[in-house]
Amino acid sequence: MTYPLIPAGHVSCRSCHLLCRRFPDESGEKHLCPRCGAVLHFRRPHSIVRTWSLVIAAFLLYIPANVLPMTHVISFGKGQSDTILSGVLYFIKTGMWPIALIIFTASILVPLFKLIILTGLLISVHRKSTWHPRARTVLYRITETVGRWSMLDIFVVTILVALVRLGNIASVDAGPAALFFAAVVVLTMFAAMSFDPRLIWDEMEMPYDEQSSG
Amino acid sequence: MEPITIIRSDPSPFLVACHGCDLLHRIDPLPPGATARCCRCGAVLHRSKKKSVERTLALVATGIILFVIANVYPFLGFQIGGQIRQSNLITGVAELFHQDLWLLAALVLTTTILVPALQLTGLLYVLLPFYFRLKLPKRMTMFRIVRHFQPWGMTEVFFLGILVALIKLSKMATIVPGKALYAFLALMLVLVAMMAFLDPHVVWDSGEESL
């Protein structure tokens, strides 16, 4: 069973998957999908440059996000600042290690793995790698799906800030890391969206190409 | 002059290029519940669903009611001794805004309130007329926007956040769950089910003269 690649001069709508034909007019104006109105691209525009910039920015912001305090807690007059990691350690110390594991995974591991995987994918595209394209596509899909769960800590802070508001008895304020951390999550989500997985396959030999052009 | 023409003439069997690797596939009508995957990279090409529009619409209607309840009624209460603090779903956003973290406030507002509202109203706009075989203007654009914003709706992540926050606070104070909390839990499940029951190709195949 063999299938052809998308024929030359055709473009698949990213939003509704309609297969459209392009006349040989590369005037640079934007073409819209006739069915859903999305802008048609053969590949996501400036995919590599955009993804690199977003990944590098996210790497840089990941540092203050982990070093600076995420929350300032006042409890019966005593103040205390917590980073993401010290929050995790608090849960381990109090014996709630399942929660510690959830936060550690969502806030520390997931963003880091996302950045490492995207960097790896970008390098593999640069080197025109032919190493296990399917495995790389799966890695990409995981990166794309799992990223939103990193917002967990931002939401925890939001709820703490909303609830714990009893002046000197108990109150919680968001720390500077919250903003950096949110930026990391948003930038990595945008990075995953701007990477085009078809670039992985572009370097593969195209065994079916002759058939489609024939 | 129209720069693009459509090569597909009849809706099924139809040609689809895999959005993961651009391999061209011809998908014959699938039995309900079946999934067509790309034979090269494994991406899902199409998932066929039974009574997709009816089921999704029922969930949209449920979701709208739950959304209102979740936003109007008290969400959580926080009590130490005689002092109690009541909060609504929007309170966290308001507090972040007051602490001059308006970017953060905007992000939380978007992911927990605005995007779910957009998904519910957008799908109502697209699917209700569809059910009665009516065609409203810009419905394809609306459908595209709804699907585009799907990753930014994060009610299930927010709910996990609530659980973590409550466990964190459980030793410090008494937590009083409000009506809105239960509504929000139900809303989260409804939103997930709504997108799972939706077969986008039913809507996409319903018209080409959209713009």
Image (cartoon, coloured by chain):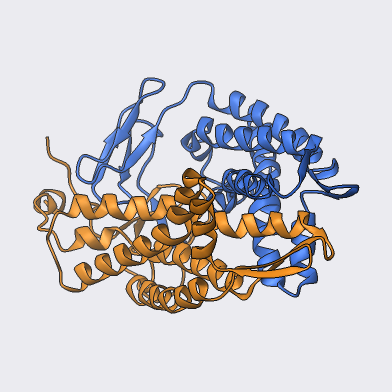
- Residue B152 in picture, x, y percent from top left: 57, 54
Q: Answer above or below: position of B91 versus A48.
A: above
- Relative depth, front residue between A61 and B25: A61
- Relative depth, front residue between A58 and B146: A58
Name the image quarter holding residue A40: bottom left
The structure residue drawn at horizontal position 35% and vertical position 77%, both measured from the top left corner, is A49
Name the image quarter holding residue A153: bottom right
- Relative depth, front residue between B120 and A96: A96
**Chain (blue):** B
- Relative depth, front residue between B83 and A28: B83
- Residue A175 in picture, x, y percent from top left: 64, 72
The structure residue drawn at horizontal position 50% and vertical position 46%, both measured from the top left corner, is A95
Q: Answer above or below: position of B129 versus A37.
A: above
> Is there any visible trace of residue A37 in the rendered image?
yes
- Residue B177 in picture, x, y percent from top left: 77, 38
> Is there any visible trace of residue A20 in the rendered image?
no
The structure residue drawn at horizontal position 61% and vertical position 24%, both measured from the top left corner, is B54
The extreme right residue here reads B82
Colour applied to chain A:
orange
